[in-house]
Image (spheres, rainbow, N blue to C red):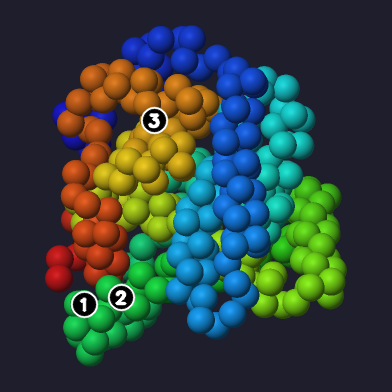
């Protein structure tokens, strides 16, 4: 059985998972929130009190930014869970908690919740998918990328792509819709209306923007009370690492030489959802990120399933979908390099598109 000739149904997959795993435990979720927030604050407290704010200590501050940003990515993951209503059966509680967790990380919660719902609704659709949609190899942009790869060589091209994904990817996606679906063209998470946000989203997008303004104002007041160096060292450094992780995680979950994208003639929701890839994250990172990178297939099929039950549910999903399950056993950095070296997709027939071989 292949994704082209999909015979299994969502109902069959759901039936294979014990139903208690879909039940939400608000206290259990808040324990995860407490873990992520307290560990982030503890690292910040230690850095504030014990790392001197001098150029000589720059290597230590870089290490602090990486570690604290990696921990704080757990906060982002939990805000993402709230966006899927996986915290509580009471929807407004999800939005209140998700808004707080995301806005403090400068994520426009309601705007991103909407675009991310489209990402789940159109996963691996060639033109209507949202985030990390590949270019077509014979398109104008595809030819530009191929020319860059020919000039730079595979290694340098992959490094440039990793930089673009990890550093530029998140702000460019929010501002102008880079890597969004070609069917929508230019989009922005801060302007309504556009092809991503209809007029009815005005209130929610405005609320998201106001939340960001409040956090930015708080950072500004912090800067006035202390120094830009302190804000940069304690907040902006880890914030950039959080952005790095969220774009790398999303990129790796949906980009691989062996995993197809589908055009309108072949795409179905379940085909797209099962094109998600579970990657091989180091155990400590996987734990801090609440296993988002190693249980993402089940998350795409059942996004409302709470993170603390995902690992167990994944066992049942793998049993029922068999070779339809995509898992990469290679080390994370090898997978990132291999995926970043890809240029664009080409038509393989029957509405199936795969990345062109180098």
Residue depth check, mark 1 versus mark 3: number of the one nearer the observer: 1
Name the residue at 18% across, 31% down.
323
Identify the secondary structure beneath mark 1. Answer: helix
Judge whether 220 appears above or below 194 on screen.
below
Q: Earlier in the sequence, mark 1 or mark 3?
A: 1
Residue bearing the label numbered 2: 159
Name the residue at 81% across, 52% down.
207
Identify the secondary structure beneath mark 2. Answer: helix
Q: Is 222 situated left or right of 255 in this image? A: right
Residue depth check, mark 3 versus mark 2: number of the one nearer the observer: 2
Tag 1 near tag 2, CB within 8 Å = yes
Judge whether 222 appears above or below 152 on screen.
above
Residue bearing the label numbered 3: 298
Judge whether 78 appears above or below 187 on screen.
above
Residue bearing the label numbered 1: 155
* Residue 256 in view in this figure: no
**Residue 239 or 183: which is nearer the viewer?**
239
Name the residue at 49% across, 29% down.
307
């Amino acid at each position: 059985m292949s994704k082209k000739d999909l015979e299994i149904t969502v109902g069959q997959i759901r039936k294979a998972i014990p139903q208690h795993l879909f039940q939400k435990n608000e206290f259990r979720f808040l324990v995860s929130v407490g873990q992520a927030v307290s560990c982030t604050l503890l690292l910040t407290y230690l850095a504030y009190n014990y790392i001197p704010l001098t150029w000589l200590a720059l290597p230590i501050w870089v290490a602090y930014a990486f570690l604290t940003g990696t921990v704080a990515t757990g906060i982002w993951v939990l805000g993402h869970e709230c966006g899927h209503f996986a915290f509580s059966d009471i929807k407004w509680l999800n939005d209140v908690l998700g808004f707080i967790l995301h806005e403090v990380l400068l994520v426009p919660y309601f705007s991103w919740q909407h675009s991310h719902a489209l990402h789940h609704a159109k996963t691996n659709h060639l033109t209507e998918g949202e985030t990390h949609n590949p270019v077509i190899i014979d398109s104008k942009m595809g030819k530009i990328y191929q020319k860059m790869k020919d000039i730079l060589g595979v290694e340098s091209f992959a490094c440039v792509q990793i930089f673009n994904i990890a550093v530029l990817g998140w702000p460019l996606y929010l501002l102008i819709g880079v890597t969004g679906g070609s069917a929508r063209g230019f989009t922005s998470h801060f302007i309504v209306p556009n092809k991503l946000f209809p007029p009815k989203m005005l209130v929610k997008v405005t609320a998201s923007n106001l939340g960001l303004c409040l956090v930015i104002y708080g950072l500004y007041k912090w800067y006035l009370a202390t120094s830009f160096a302190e804000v940069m060292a304690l907040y902006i450094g880890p914030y950039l690492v959080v952005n790095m992780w969220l774009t790398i995680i999303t990129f790796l979950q949906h980009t691989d030489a062996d995993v197809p994208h589908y055009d309108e003639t072949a795409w179905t929701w379940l085909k797209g959802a099962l094109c998600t890839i579970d990657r091989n994250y180091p155990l400590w990172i996987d734990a801090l990120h609440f296993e988002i990178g190693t249980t993402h297939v089940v998350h795409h099929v059942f996004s409302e399933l709470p993170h603390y039950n995902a690992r167990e549910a994944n066992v049942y999903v793998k049993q029922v979908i068999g070779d339809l399950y995509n898992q990469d056993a290679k080390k994370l950095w090898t997978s990132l390099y291999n995926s970043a070296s890809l240029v664009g997709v080409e038509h393989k027939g029957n509405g199936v598109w795969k990345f062109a071989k180098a």
